[in-house]
Image (tube, coloured by chain):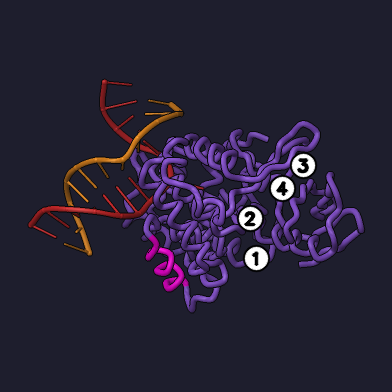
Chain colours: A purple, B red, C orange
Amino acid sequence: MNWINNETYIEIYPPLEFNYRECLIFLNRSSQEVLHRIKDGYLYKLLKVNGQNILCKIGYQANSIKVEFPVHTPSESTQEKIVQYICEWFDLKRNLNSFYEMAQEDKILQPLVKKYYGLRIIGMPDLFEALVWAIIGQQINLTFAYTLKRRFVEQFGESLTFEGETYWLFPTYERVAAIQVDDLRNLQFTLRKSEFIIDIAKIMASGQLTKEILLQQEDFLKSKNFLMAIRGVGAWTADYVLMKCIQDPTSFPIADVGLHNALKNQLALNRKPTIEEIKSIATHWEGWQAYATFYLWRSLYDETI
DNA sequence: CACCAGGGACTAC
DNA sequence: GTAGTCCATGGT
């Protein structure tokens, strides 16, 4: 990824097929989000890099992503890691040409890629965050999921306050490995979810589960099976994590109710499609199932920015 | 007041 | 392997 360091700020040059506004609309879908804030077209995000909490103010102008540091300017090696995070967050290294070529000949995707052109999968570079967020979201509506996430982050995460606004980091697995089930039950997590999340924190703290281990798996299926061996991680959660954290474009959370509702809308059905119907539709998406899913998710939200 | 929500574990055939 | 049940609470 091309980028330059201008001493006090960074400029990142994304691919041509990149729409900053579309990405912000997705990031802005919940007013309860605590891991970033959008204000006046800028995206504020607190990152912990090299042991330092760095507040980033991210904007877009003249075809480049500009990252400023309102609190203090980090060292060059820290800036490099911030660039890496942002590249993963917005999936900037992905070449979308073949996705768009496929979508042009797909009845469902064709209108979506026209409408949301340049939207990229918004990732979750932190594996622990991706796993916990997926488990929180299992079988409850997204509004309540955001409520639970906010409580979790505000209870166990670090924060930084700047100009009256508080910015949060997602809790670390080290911290969560040391809490008790009742600590999460008190936040209205179910007993099961409480157990799953603390167990995963302990597995990660032991070093048996890392993002590197997942990335080193030979193929998609081995990564998925590795994740599914963890209690609390079923097919949906494994696919979700591979999509949002490992950024495998072939991952496909086919049982996802959001996907089902989006397809119901796009196909103007009076019922949700069956799994078999979705499998049939998705044969044309081969290689890009994750992007097809993400564009369908995007279709569920009105533009609220 | 039903029914659903970005599922998964557990149990019983 | 797969069908049934429970989880727990908010949103609509």
Q: Which mark is residue A120?
A: 2
Q: Which residue is mark 4?
A: A46
Please provide percent x and percent y for residue A220.
Answer: 46, 71
Marked residue chain, label 3: A
Q: Is residue A6 left or right of residue A302?
A: right
User: Do the residues at pointers 2 and 1 share their chain?
Assistant: yes
Answer whether residue A117 is magenta in the image.
Answer: no
Boundaries of the magenta span: A220-230
Of C11 and A285, the residue lying toward us: C11
Q: Residue furthest bottom?
A: A218
Compared to residue A161, the image places residue A122 above or below, namely below
Q: Are marks 1 and 4 in contact (CB under 8 Å)?
A: no
Compared to residue A33, the image places residue A294 above or below, namely below
Q: Quadrant of residue A104?
A: bottom right
Q: Which residue is mark 1?
A: A94
Q: Are marks 2 and 1 in contact (CB under 8 Å)?
A: yes
